[in-house]
Image (tube, rainbow, N blue to C red):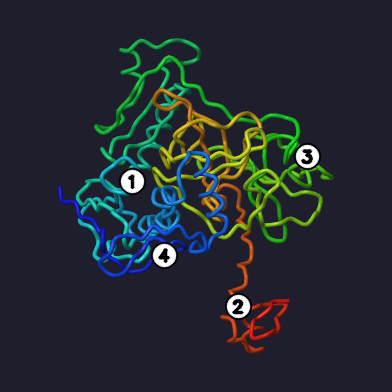
Amino acid sequence: MTTTSNRGTGGTISASLATILIGGAGCGPDRSTDRAAIDDPGWVEDLTYIAAERGWTWAETVDAIGWQPAFSDYVQTLRDTYPDAFAGARITPDGPHQAVVGFAGAVPAGVENDPRIAGLDIAFRPDRGFAEAALADQARAVHDAVRAAGFEDVTTTYDLETGDVEVEMVPSKAGRRVPRDELLRTVPALGDNVRVALTQELPAGREALYGGGKMLACTAAFMVKKGASQGYLTAGHCPNSTEWQQNWAGGEGGHATFKAEHKGMWGDLQWHTNNGNTLSSDFYDNVNHTRPASSLGFAVEGMTLCRLGKTTGKRCDEVRKTNTSSQGYHRLVSMKNEYADPGDSGGPWFAGSKLFGVHSGYQWAWFKNRDVFSAVQYVDEALGVSLVFSPPPPPPPPPSGDCTLSTCNQQCGTYGGKCIGGDCICL
């Protein structure tokens, strides 16, 4: 197997971390401590929070995870462009490289030179022999086949390193323990790359709880729309009849009108409208603190994401698997740990202003419980709705002393601006 790396290619990143990651041509990445170099203020807040949570310095935090949202955008481009060839990507904090990107056959020309990954140490691995999209389809088919055979307690995912489908299951049907020989006769042939682990129990739960917070039950996530109707996302298993509150601390609210739910192929999702009240596309990223929603995010194994729930507040963790099936739910993203508690269901998963998911609950996976969420990239398939993003902030004003009224008005947008002492002041 041939492995290539693009470390030291220089260049510039077109996404938010260009000026803090990339040095000149031929140089390694420059881990600047300048917060102003990151153009997503929400990501600065998350990095600051993670640094305090983990006891890291700012420079250590930027070096470890500051580049990950831009990298995840790059990975999604590969998924979309090479669906039959892309073999997955993993961020490897404990490995010899920052990340690994694989392809079923040869590495397509030019992918190593994408400006979004310039200066990062990424190993490109050809000839993996499988495509991630096909492996994900196989894992879901295996999961459904095992459940169709009468085994309800099942979780399924896949391993990007080996190309194996991994199944954990309780060998019992209708409360009766199934002997091994009967199990082998009952479960259909699953494929040579399928590994099955038997366990005594397989806990999985959806974390809904009545009382307080953003909603009477669960937590609200992101704003969505369908035609002229606007509302918000939460978890599909949450009660269809619920109340909402005006702000995190409580305050005047009202009844939430159930619109639709989905629990199955596209995750665990639901949406509500609320009495015609004006909704904001901003979302809560911490208790009593909101930020704009800028764009859709796509999870990558090993990347760090943050979550907010009305019970446990804000916590951040690493993605373990981007595509798992648990009981009757598919396409769930599984995290490294379980930090959420009852009441956190429906809460947002995010990185800066990028929207990644809606918290669902937990699943037992390889010796421990792990948080899981539904990826919001599938809200259209699941509910027929689309995410609502915040309008972009106005561009920065012209440099001091160079202000002209026409330029200032153009830079300031809707309300225009005026020149005072050579500086553009937005109205």
Residue pointed to by mark 4: 18
Residue at 55%, 52% in the rendered image: 355
Residue at 60% x, 67% y is: 392
Q: Is residue 370 left or right of residue 273?
A: left
Label 1, label 2: how far apart the Cα atoms are: 48 Å
Q: Could you tell me residue 188's position as x and y percent?
A: 33, 26
Horizontal arrangement in the rendering, residue 198 relative to residue 361 (left or right) = left
Mark 3 neighbour density, 10 Å: few (under 14) some (14–19) many (20 or more) = some
Q: From the image, state whether disc 3 or disc 4 is nearer to you.
A: 4
How far apart are the alpha carbons under marks 2 and 3?
Answer: 43 Å
Circle on res. 134:
1
Q: Residue furthest left?
A: 1
Q: Nearer the viewer, mark 3 or mark 1?
A: 3
Q: Earlier in the sequence, mark 1 or mark 4?
A: 4
Q: Earlier in the sequence, mark 3 or mark 1?
A: 1
x and y, in percent, of residue 306 in the image: 54, 44
At mark 4, the secondary structure is helix
